[in-house]
């Protein structure tokens, strides 16, 4: 992420509140990019379950139909495998997919500076204009290197029925209220919160949110670009998490649980009524729905934002979030740019919104959001004073694994708040 990250991302909240009319939708029938020979485009994304997986397959087929001679090989991979292993290895080998998922912040900066990504500034200027401020987290030094398809904020996905059974009439707004709700949920024999610490990153997000609570906005704005973690607030974030873990809010065996794979994952536990809450990003409705017995989003599912922490320096109106975008490999054929143009079209974005898989990045597609929880997230995004990108993606690709491992070590009782800060400092020193 560039050094003006906070102010640019903050502008997204305002942008999402705008109604933009008069946009020209791109359709698969534009047929301006290929058709003059046999071309195969490879496209990697992170959708491993429906409805999003099938939707991307439909989009690829539509593009093929509109572009004779062009074949699109579309493949979905587990999110962390894709971003942490498959794409970095493919880029390093020089045999990367033509269109692939790109995270904002430090991730896109790293890939752009290494020369892996095609500059889309001119070739997709119309699309960039349609999206407005939403595309800025995927810019590096004023150039556009990827187009987002979803952007949302994090919060608690919860089971309204279990809350009612436990006698919880209002969703928690502060940490003490969350801890009180957890006690009531335990009293009815359910796990209050599910977390997939076995995948590291779902657990990491707990510390990220406590860091937003502990650190002032000014500290975040200065410390992250400078990779300076000397402010005591970073240790305080670990202390807050350590105290919270001591209240035993998570399901038994959470350290080995997956975040998204199977009925015993954290998303699966919520989907099947075996846990009351999960802290997760805006994409989680579709994930939970895919793991429910009838493979649909449960009626009991709803959402509320992360709680404030009294007595800390953080601004309670700041939220944490991020998005997924697609970039084009530097050596990809022109048809790959045309495919991305179609993926990013308002029509496809409206269909993405209608699936309930996430918040669309195209401002013109927000009206197609039908899922009640996603509507709550869209409102929360619009009300955010700033949106801090996920810390692991904002800091850059080398920070994710050591940071998240240190956080899980703390949650397991084998690490300290200071160890987390040391992991950050050691990673920064090795750059």
Image (cartoon, grey):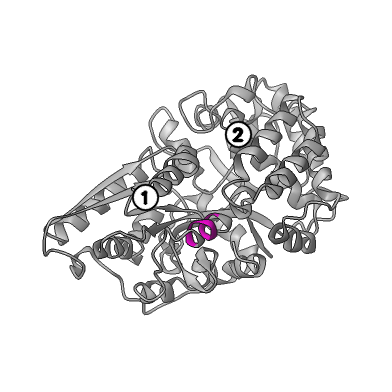
In the image, residue 12 lies at what x, y percent? 57, 67
Q: Nearer the viewer, residue 142 or 31?
A: 142
**In the shown orientation, is residue 54 left or right of residue 164?**
left
> Residue at the bottom extreme?
22
Residue at x 72% of width, y 55% of height: 227
Which quadrant of the figure has residue 336?
Answer: bottom left
Q: Nearer the viewer, residue 52 or 82?
A: 82
In the image, residue 230 lies at what x, y percent? 83, 52
The reply to whether residue 2 is in sight is: yes
Q: Is residue 108 magenta?
A: yes
**In the shown orientation, is residue 82 left or right of residue 252?**
left
The disc, 1 or 2, on the residue closer to the chain's N-terminal end is 1
The reply to whether residue 170 is in sight is: no
**3D distance between C-alphas at marks 1 and 2:** 29 Å
Residue at x 59% of width, y 46% of height: 398
Magenta segment's dominant SS is helix
Q: Which residue is mark 1?
A: 94
Which quadrant of the figure has residue 414?
Answer: top right
> Residue at the right extreme?
311
Residue at x 47% of width, y 24% of height: 263
Residue 289 versus residue 253 in the image, above or below:
below
Q: Is residue 106 magenta?
A: no
- The magenta-colored residue range is 107-112
Q: Nearer the viewer, residue 143 or 180?
A: 143
Q: Which residue is mark 2?
A: 200
* Image quadrant in which the N terminus is located: bottom right
Q: Secondary structure at mark 2?
A: loop
**In the shown orientation, is residue 121 left or right of residue 5?**
left
In the image, residue 274 lies at what x, y percent? 57, 24
Q: Nearer the viewer, residue 226 or 275?
A: 226
């Amino acid at each position: 992420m560039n050094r003006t990250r906070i102010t640019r991302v903050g502008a997204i909240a305002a942008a999402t509140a705008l109604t933009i009319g008069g946009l020209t939708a791109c359709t698969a029938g534009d047929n301006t990019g290929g058709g003059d020979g046999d071309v195969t485009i490879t496209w990697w994304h992170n959708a491993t379950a429906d409805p999003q997986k099938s939707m991307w397959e439909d989009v690829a087929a539509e593009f093929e139909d509109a572009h004779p001679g062009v074949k699109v090989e579309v493949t979905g991979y587990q999110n962390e495998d894709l971003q942490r292993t498959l794409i970095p290895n493919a880029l390093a080998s020089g045999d990367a997919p033509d269109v692939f998922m790109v995270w904002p912040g430090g991730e896109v900066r790293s890939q752009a500076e290494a020369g892996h990504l095609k500059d889309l500034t001119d070739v997709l200027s119309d699309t960039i204009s349609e999206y407005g401020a939403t595309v800025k987290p995927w810019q590096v030094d004023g150039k556009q290197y990827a187009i987002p398809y979803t952007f949302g904020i994090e919060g608690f996905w919860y089971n309204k029925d279990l809350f009612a059974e436990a006698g919880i009439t209002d969703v928690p707004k502060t940490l003490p209220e969350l801890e009180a709700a957890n006690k009531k949920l335990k009293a009815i024999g359910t796990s209050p919160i599910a977390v997939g610490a076995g995948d590291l990153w779902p657990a990491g997000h707990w510390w990220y949110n406590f860091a937003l609570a502990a650190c002032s906005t000014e500290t975040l704005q200065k410390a992250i670009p400078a990779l300076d973690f000397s402010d005591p607030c970073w240790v305080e974030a670990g202390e807050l998490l350590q105290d919270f873990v001591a209240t035993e809010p998570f399901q038994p065996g959470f350290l080995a649980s997956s975040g998204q794979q199977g009925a015993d994952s954290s998303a699966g536990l919520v989907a099947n009524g075996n846990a009351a809450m999960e802290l997760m990003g805006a994409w989680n409705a579709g994930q939970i729905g895919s793991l429910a017995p009838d493979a649909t989003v449960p009626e009991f599912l709803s959402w509320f934002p992360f709680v404030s922490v009294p007595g800390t320096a953080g601004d309670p109106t700041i939220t944490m979030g991020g998005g997924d975008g697609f970039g084009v490999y530097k050596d990809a054929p022109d048809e790959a740019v045309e495919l991305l143009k179609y993926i990013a079209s308002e029509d496809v974005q409206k269909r993405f919104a209608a699936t309930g898989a996430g918040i669309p990045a195209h401002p013109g597609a927000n009206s197609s959001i039908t899922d009640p929880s996603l509507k709550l997230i869209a409102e929360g995004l619009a009300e955010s004073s700033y949106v801090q990108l996920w810390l692991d993606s904002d800091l850059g690709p080398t920070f994710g694994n050591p940071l998240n491992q240190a956080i899980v070590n703390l949650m397991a009782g084998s690490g300290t708040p200071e160890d987390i800060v040391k992991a950050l400092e050691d990673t920064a020193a090795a750059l």
